[in-house]
Image: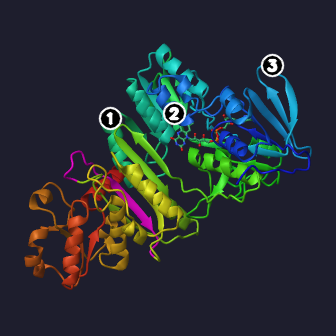
Amino acid sequence: MGNISLKTEQSKKPRILIVGGVAGGASCAARARRLSEDAEIIIFERGPFVSFANCGLPYYVGNVITHEQSLLVATPELFNKRFNIEIRVQSEVLAIDREKRELRIKNSLTGDAYTENYDFLVLAPGSSPIRPPLPGIDLPGIFTLRTIPDSNRMKDWIVEKNVKRAVIVGGGFIGLETTENLAKRGVAATIIEMLPQVMPPVDPEIAAPLQEHLKANGVSLHLGDSVAKFESGQIHDTIIVTTKSGAKFECEMVLLAVGVRPEISLAKEAGLEIGALGGIRVTNQMRTSDRNIWAVGDAVEVQDFVTGEWSLIPLAGPANRQGRIAADVILGRESSFRGVQGTMVCKLFNAVVAASGVSEKTLLRLKTNGKEIPYEKVYLHPGSHASYYPGAKTITMKLIYSPKDGRLLGAQAIGEEGVEKRIDVIAMAIQKQASIYDLEEAELCYAPQFGTAKDPVNFAGMVAANALRGDSPAAHWANARESGKFILDVREPSEFKAGHFESAVNIPLPTLRNTMHELPKDKEILVYCGVGQRSYYAARILRLNGFQARSISGGMMTYKSQRQVQST
Ligand code: FAD
């Protein structure tokens, strides 16, 4: 489609004003220009930069990204020359007059305030880091990380104060990524996290190996506790962080990474509808309750693709796509946002954790709130590539799906390599409302360096489909504690000796056909092995011989993660 000729009430040359010039705002502006040569497009940005890589900030703090310049994806000059888009930095939009379709703007360099009219307004103000009103919160050395100036302040402080110890409040991805980057600079970090796990988007048994990995890399974890106050230490320039449980941590620097809150003050004061979660309410075309105003990015509430629930998902991908959709709709296209899946990835030291779709804990919370979505789950631990090719690493995967028709609901994985590509494939499958049976049939890239002829994604589908078809119904470790079960360990005696489930009986898989007559036929037999593969074979042998047998999903490897969860 060529340029769209626009007719508006005000003029033949429509004015599109955009508040916020980073992910959502900048992508909206650039897309709008690609659809219209006529439109006048102006971005107002409060800060000194537009289109900067906030996702790169932790790596800039860690000196992995060495130059501030590298964080500037595009400059005002580039926007002007390449796209004929006017950028006004250091320009804060103070108010919206919806009647007059007018913005009030303050130039923070000169202090001057002025107004500008719009035909279409796009709000992309993002979200701001939460600063809980705790005693001592304003002490020097306590930082949040959102902008380039924030990261420069942190970098300067690290050098000036010769920071060796930091407390990171919050174990989400910004806290964790910054922890890793501080470690690269020789700063030992303690993470204080209110929840009993780090990385809240994933389930505890997927976070457990990540926690072990963090500890192995020298990170101290203080979980299930929250900060009560900050005080100046006895020694010059130190901060004492005291938690609600009374634990104390002394450090030279604190990063507050306890989450973000949508920036809605402009929208709220203009009387736009705000959702129950505190984000700007928009339609799937990113339109607010005012027909001439759109909103995108961290500031908006959008519907979860899987659950249909309203949610706040502060991620760059959705912000960029939403910006593009707003521009499309403003310029006459019928684009619409499909909803969020929360697809995420994070690399910490050598570990990569990724997820898409709904987690089990979210499903359990929804159930408690009266909105039950039936689900089943399987665990598996395939190799990242063919085991005969050097360097394969284990990936731990959890797949959640509907027991009715196998529709995919969510997936999570942790490992060292090949994690995000598996989750990306499943993310697309979730969005296309595909099922575990589609994963079985997916035709994916294969050469020994990259995967296996049956890729972990195929495997995940096969394991789940085996369970759902009834060939090998899945059991879980929680079932092993139910009464009346016979627990069978089919690993080799040496593996059994090294550690096993307390009541388990050991019959190694190769001897099972000859010894199975010793097993009970009046009890359900739950079979396990190292990762769930031998136990699957064993369960099939037993079921074909008239036993009631199920394989425990994920085997001992999943058992260990669940034990770690219980011990935290
Ligand atoms: P922003 O990108 O925050 O832009 C909003 C802009 O609006 C700001 O620059 C602000 O100054 C400006 N503004 C606000 N109010 C006004 C006003 N009244 N007038 C003028 N200007 C205003 N996401 C991922 O998917 N992956 C990652 O790895 C990742 N890492 C991150 C790391 C860090 C440290 C941070 C802070 C975020 C990270 N994110 C990541 C999140 C991602 O950056 C955000 O989801 C995304 O930038 C949101 O885009 P946005 O356009 O809604 O808001």
Point out the quarter of the image occupied by ligand 1: top right
Mark 1: secondary structure? loop
Estimate the x, y position of residue 340 in percent, counting from the top left.
58, 56
Which mark's residue is nearer the viewer, 1 or 2?
2
Q: Is residue 398 magenta?
A: yes
Q: Which amino acid does label 2 sit on?
A: Gly
Q: What residue type is labelled 1?
A: Asn
Estimate the x, y position of residue 48 in percent, counting from the top left.
67, 25
Which residue appears farthest toward the front when viewing the image? 2
Q: What residue type is labelled 3?
A: Thr
Quarter of the rendering containing residue 135? top right
Specify whether 238 is left or right of 351: right
Residue denoted by label 2: 56
Estimate the x, y position of residue 240 in percent, counting from the top left.
49, 25
Q: Do the residues labelled 2 and 3 touch (CB within 8 Å)?
A: no
Mark 3: secondary structure? loop
Mark closest to the chain's N terminus, 1 or 2? 2
Q: Which residue is drawn at 26% across and 52% down?
A: 448
Q: Residue at x 65, y 55 (%)?
A: 302
Q: Does the magenta stretch include residue 182?
A: no
Question: Which span of residues is magenta-colored?
Answer: 387-403
Please tell me whether residue 470 is drawn above or below residue 291 in the rendered image: below
Specify whether 441 is left or right of 550: right
Residue behind label 2 places its C-beta within 8 angstroms of ligand 1: yes
Give the spatial CA distance, label 2 vs label 3. Answer: 30 Å
Mark 2: secondary structure? helix
Mark closest to the chain's N terminus, 2 or 3? 2
Disc assigned to residue 217 = 1
Residue denoted by label 3: 110
Q: Tag count in the figure? A: 3
Quarter of the picture holding the N terminus: bottom right
